[in-house]
Amino acid sequence: MVLVSGMAMACSVKKQADGQEYDLMENLTARYNIVYHGREIIADVERENFASHRDNYQQLLPVLIEPTEATASANTRLMDSVIGKALDIINRKARSKYINEAYLLTGKANYLKGNYYNAVEFFSYVANTFADQPEYRQAALIWKARSFMQLGNLAEAGLVLDTVFTGLETEKKSVGLAFATQANYYLLTHDEESAITMLMQALDHTGHKPTKLRWHFLLGQLLEKQGRMEEAYAHYSRVVRSNAPYEMSFHAGLNRVFLVTADNASAEDRVRLLRRMLRDGKNASFKDQLYYQIGEVFYADGNVPEALANYEKALRSFNDNRYQAVRTYLKLADHYFGQADYPTAKLYYDSVGMSLPADFPDAGAVQRKIANLDELIGQLRIIAHQDSLQYLARLDEGRRQAELDSLITRTYAQIEAAKPKSKQSGSSRSTDRLPFDDLPGMAASYTDNRFYFNNPDAMGMGQAEFRRRWGNRQLRDNWRFSDMTGGVQANASNPVVQEEQTSPLADTVATDSTAWASQLRERYLLDLPNTEEKMALSNGQIHDALLRVGAIYRDDLRDHKEAADAYEALLERYPDTKEAPLVYYNLYRLYLDVDEQRAAYYREKLLSAFPQSLYSNIIRDPMYLAKLEQQKQVLDQAYEQIYVRYTEQQYTEVVDEVTRILEQGQGREQIRSQLAYLRALALGRISTLDTFENALLELVKDFPEDSLVTPLATQHLAFIEANRDTLTGRTYALQGVDTDRERFVDEPTITLWPQLVIRHGPERPRPRRELAVGAAVQTGIRTSGKLENTGGITRQQLAQTADVGEIGPSSYRNLELLPDSATYYFVINVTSERVNLAPSRFGIGQFNRTRYAGAAISHQLKTVDGENQLIYIGPFSTYEQARLYESRILPMLPDIMKIPADYYNTFVITERNFGTLSDFDKIDDYHSIYQEQVKGDQ
């Protein structure tokens, strides 16, 4: 016994190859009690993740099955158990040789529970500490790269994978995973060609058959996208001939239909193959996809009626495949929009928005279109409408009357066809389509193949918006196609669509079709551009609409091709447009990364035709705008200092300083022109009429395009000409303010800053953060600042967006907060009490004297709670007058205000509510609500 015990004790401690001692019993317990069970748990979780994953075969399959939020959450307790066991080795079995295994298991467990940051740290430790053990080093690096990819850090993932491939030959077990991880990296970086190469290598080093089948399918998809049809067909065939799941096998066979004899197969051959698949009972759950593919074949072959019929069959065969339904809705919507059938397209795009899956390809682009194409469709209609009017105007009287007869007949038929639908739904809406959009002269060349998504509630506006439009609908299939709780009936499969508003002309049809036809004819004849003035106005509308279309595609939809088409259409129709520099610059930028030759062409056009334009300067110097902004800030500060000298009657210093600045020739013309005007006024204070007049003439000559001070200078010159005899005898052209003399027309009074605060009204103290824009009962606003529905405005009501079509004015405006008639002010809210607003107010006065000469409005200043300065301009007697003033001054505010743009914001407010703005928070709250009102009112 003693001998046996001695031998056991001797064997319990051994030395590793590097001389380090380890404990045999610790090894045994670590291996069989901890490591083995940890490996098995992780393997089981990976198998479960693989088995529970459902592939969408209508988009690229993922290379690796990664954890999701659901699987990570479900596996957290198991992974915590693995981590606890591994830490037990690390902390208590320090002499075990499975320390490396314990750290690797901890990293994998953190990865599978979605804790990727911790996973990176553990894998980094393993790779660095056990660098001499390739089995652990390579595995740790691969998992580390996967962790970085899950975190979205592709740059770090790429660097780690580079290290992996330098040691690829040192260890064989992880080679397949290394190639697969590299393939995944290439797909994330949009290098599909390299991904194909890596994936083929991964196939050769992987024995797991289900994974290999997925990779064969993915290779088929990638090769098909690359145009390598024969190779793609071979990989799909491997899937079809295997014991793959039926859904995978079906989609592989479906994809092969479009690859087999791709070069010479006729449409009939492909349709025959697809219909053979339709007749197979095993494919009953895939009928929607088969009908869709049949429709695609017909559409590509130009057989549009058959294509549309099969798309409709696909929708009627809906079988819980939301992804396929969206594809079909999108295809139909695109088609009808391309045909300028906007009402029908509207229904389909509405369905797209309501069903769009988050993982749909380019889902972001689709959502942007849904959010922005209301305006686009309006601009396209302007183009088609004006083109049609111009077409009618060019016809002789006989042909014009014939076209109008045809137009009236078609419109009447549309309204009559809509009547049965109206009776069923309880609505009497007429078609929204412009009656003569189909005239031969319409802008069909431009409106073809355009997208139109129009449904704000499909954009996540919430249930309130949905109920407002559709009523309380049940969550059920085909919710749109039946009359539910009195909602509007609209069938997307029926091209006869009824709009949401009742047309006055449509009402007339029900009573007197002859009178209706006469009114319609008279309406279009009245709008004909049959004079030069009307034609110029019509062309101006088309010009502005094309310009706006280009901007929408460029900025909102980010569709560079369509944006370029719009701008080129504009140049083709109006080559002498004043916006040519902007258009050339936009075309240069749009083509820069896709067509270098076209980009160079427009660059040279811009530089040669408009060498001194803003956009030419930007091309020559990419930092030009930043430098211009710096110059503006410098000149704004200089203007403020010069203005203060002017108010202090240091006129000679004003003249000298402005002359010095203007001679440098730097800065935006808008600021330089204002400085020149200030110099002219200073000269008028110290010089004769001739000098003052010459200064004004020089200003008008140097700044002919200026819209702020040049009109003022022109007014002064006209006054001088009309009163020259009276003014010539003056010692100085401009005299000090004297109530006993006749003042110079609109001669500005100079008020020293900060002596601008007037009419301080008594303010009741209110708690900070109370929103006081009116009585709570009137506005529906709690004293806490939160919105509630008490018969007033709600946050949802403020966020409404108007549907396409003519709507009543101010449909979403809360009339308690912003009534049609009241005493209104336009307010510039400056969020600092320290800035000098006298120079800015001087510019506001210039704007008012040129745009509102003779109007009884003024600009005044109110300081609020030592925090804000409110410049309020008015009074205006109606909401529309205040909004009109706002629309006119906003584009010019950056030049008028001599303070940074982030120092101020603007809003329109009634006199009653203006009195409640007693501190910073109340002003900020009112501004936020006003902005929401404005969005809904547009």
Image (spheres, helix red, strand yellow):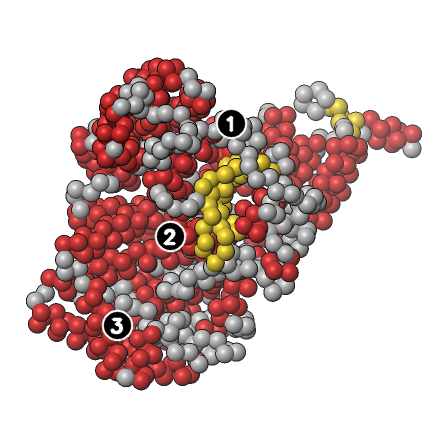
User: For mark 3, what is the residue?
Assistant: 305
**Image x and y of residue 73, in percent:** 66, 51
Q: Amino acid at mark 3?
A: Pro
Residue depth check, mark 1 versus mark 3: number of the one nearer the observer: 1
* Residue on which the image places disc 1: 753
Instruction: Pick whichever, 344 or 542, lies toward us.
Output: 542
Residue 619 placement: quadrant: top left
- Residue 661 sits in quarter: top left
Residue 708 at least partly seen: yes
> Of residues 436 and 813, which is closer to you in this image?
813
User: Where is residue 681 shown, x and y percent of the image?
Assistant: 34, 25
Residue topped by disc 2: 221
Residue depicted at x 23% and y 29%: 725
Task: Answer few, some or many: residues within 10 Å of disc 2's Cα (few below 14, many 20 plus, some between 14 and 19).
Answer: many
Instruction: Give the residue drawn at x 43%, y 19%.
Output: 649
x, y (%) of residue 417? 30, 81
Q: Secondary structure at mark 3?
A: helix
Note whether 906 is above or below 283 in the view shown. Answer: above
Relative height, residue 665 to residue 767 (above, below) = above
Which circle's residue, 2 or 1, is located before the other in the chain? 2
Front residue of 389 and 738: 738
Q: Residue furthest front?
A: 740
- The CA span between labels 2 and 1 is 71 Å
Question: Looking at numbered disc 1 in the image, what kind of residue is underneath it?
Answer: Trp
Q: Position of residue 814 (x, y in %)?
A: 52, 59
Residue extending farthest right: 2
Q: Is residue 863 left or right of residue 60?
A: right
Q: Is tag 1's residue or tag 3's residue first in the polypeptide sequence?
A: 3
